[in-house]
Image (cartoon, rainbow, N blue to C red):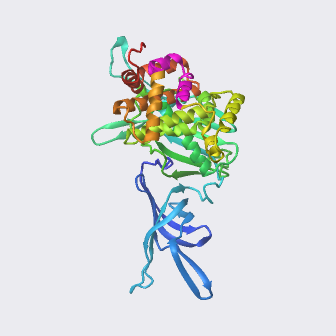
Amino acid sequence: MANDPLSLDEAGEWAGLWWLPDDPDERIPGILRYDAEEGLSLSLIGAFEDRIMSKPAPGMTVFQEGTRTWKVIHGAAEQREVTLLDCVPTGGKRTMFARVKSPDKQTVIASIAIIGAHLKGEEDAAFSAAEISVEDLGYWAASSVFEGFHGAPDGRLDGTGQISVKPVDAQSVVVDGTEYRLVHTYTLPSLDQRKGETVGRMTDKVSVRVAPSEPLSLSAALKAASLIQDLIALATHCAAGVIWLRLEVAGTESALPDGKSLPPRRADVLYSPAALGKHDAKAVDHRRLFFTCDSLPFEEVLPRWCEAHGRLQAATNMILGLRYAPALFVENNLLTAVGAAEVLHRGLRIDEKPFPKAEFTTMREAMLAQVPDEYRDKFKGAIRNDPTLRDRLHALVERPDREAIAFLVPDVDYWARRTTWARNDLTHEGRTSNHSFEELLAVVEVTTAVVILNLLHELGLPAERQREIVQQHPQLRATSRTAREWLMAPGFDS
């Protein structure tokens, strides 16, 4: 449909006129092209001045090294306003000394395109709301406008059936003045007549609408998209790509003569998210979902996630990084998984100092008194009253459900010791000769699972659901088997 959002996995092009905001009268024709792999490219018939020049004296122009770039380029294409951000010229052809005069050519690469609005920049608060579609969002929402059944009198299928459309109750919540709402955009039944078949068609697209109390900028909208993307990635335990991002332009609402209101003008954002969504790909296997809005209602999980996402973002990013772009070498994944555990422990603000503050101060002063003056500052910096990695790992397993942890990590002490040993060997000696490749893989998987279980616990996932996950989720079941094979001390009685 013409009013459908622009999907990030579909190519497109817009022919129009383009200009720099500080020189709107000089307009250059060109075509903007978007491709999911190649990104945004503007091909101009003409050129913006990209040479860096100075005039040290009247009548003298000096051309300096380098090329000019532009924060913003505006355009008018296909009857829509267009803004291009972070634009860099990458090639072109000038014909000022050619035998036959012809137009210059220039190619400009942009990082972001807003199709439907003119902006001053990323921080221009020009929008009233953002709407985001992410892979598997509909599955996670656990709601649909569709209802269907097969006719089966007396328990036997009779070849009849029905699919009907019924609007669902709205799910929304306000967090710090911003409303988050699950939106179902659906079509009524239609028949598609083809040469060899007839196809009945209905669609239900689920998105999240984010509407703050004050106008928001593109930068804020991108952060909102990341917030929703990370939540779905955590819930599904796999990379969740952004399918589209659409913005509502503030102040563009209008009313018809009969009093009915028209919706605000919308603008589509084309950019490269952390993971690109495919709008027609099959949904994730339901067995791999950690939770849906059935087990954690939308109105409960969104406020908790908004609070936890900022506080625990470093750990979340590191764990999700293992899903979006896992490293080819186990050592990299080891540092990422263990690092996520450490920063998570700090983010949870677990106040576990090895020594009481007063006693530690006394001990440190006594030790420093024995150190020569020239080494005292360095020695003082090495003495810290912080828990060790092993302490942090032990503290993390104390937070989620005990039965879930016992199933996932039967021998907690052995796992914590081997994980600490592996990390220290790698960072201090540059190798992990005391661990086999298989044991390192086990350390990565188990540590990652412990971090994930802590994040789910922080979101309020019930203990019963935590147990179901570690016992039924295919990957966590495999992780538990790996822990029993590689991370249990000889003779340990589980």
Single out the residue that lies furthest toward the left.
196
Residue 402 covered by magenta stretch: yes
Q: Is residue 180 above or below residue 485?
A: below
> Residue 326's spot in the image, x, y percent?
41, 40
x, y percent for residue 159: 33, 22
Q: Indicate left or right for 99 with 14 as reference.
A: left
- Tally the numbered discs: 0
* Vertical placement of residue 254 versus 371, above or below: below
The image quarter containing residue 168 is top right
| Of residues 197 and 96, the one drawn nearer to the viewer in this rendering | 96
Q: Position of residue 217 (x, y in %)?
A: 63, 51
Range of residues picked out in magenta: 389-412
Q: Residue furthest top?
A: 154
Above or below, 152 relative to 274: above
Q: Is residue 383 visible?
A: yes
Which secondary structure dominates the residues rendered in magenta?
helix
* Residue drawn at the location 37% of the way across and 13% of the way down: 153
Q: Return the residue nearer the eye: 485 or 251.
A: 485
Q: Is residue 179 left or right of residue 48?
A: right
Quadrant location, the C terminus: top left
Instruction: Decide whether residue 303 is among the magenta residues.
Output: no
Residue at image coords 54%, 71%: 27
Q: Residue 349 appears at what percent x and percent y?
A: 64, 31
Q: Which of the 4 image quarters holds residue 470? A: top left
* Point 43% across, 85% down: residue: 97
Return the residue found at the far right: 358
Q: Is residue 448 visible?
A: no
Q: Nearer the viewer, residue 33 or 295?
A: 295
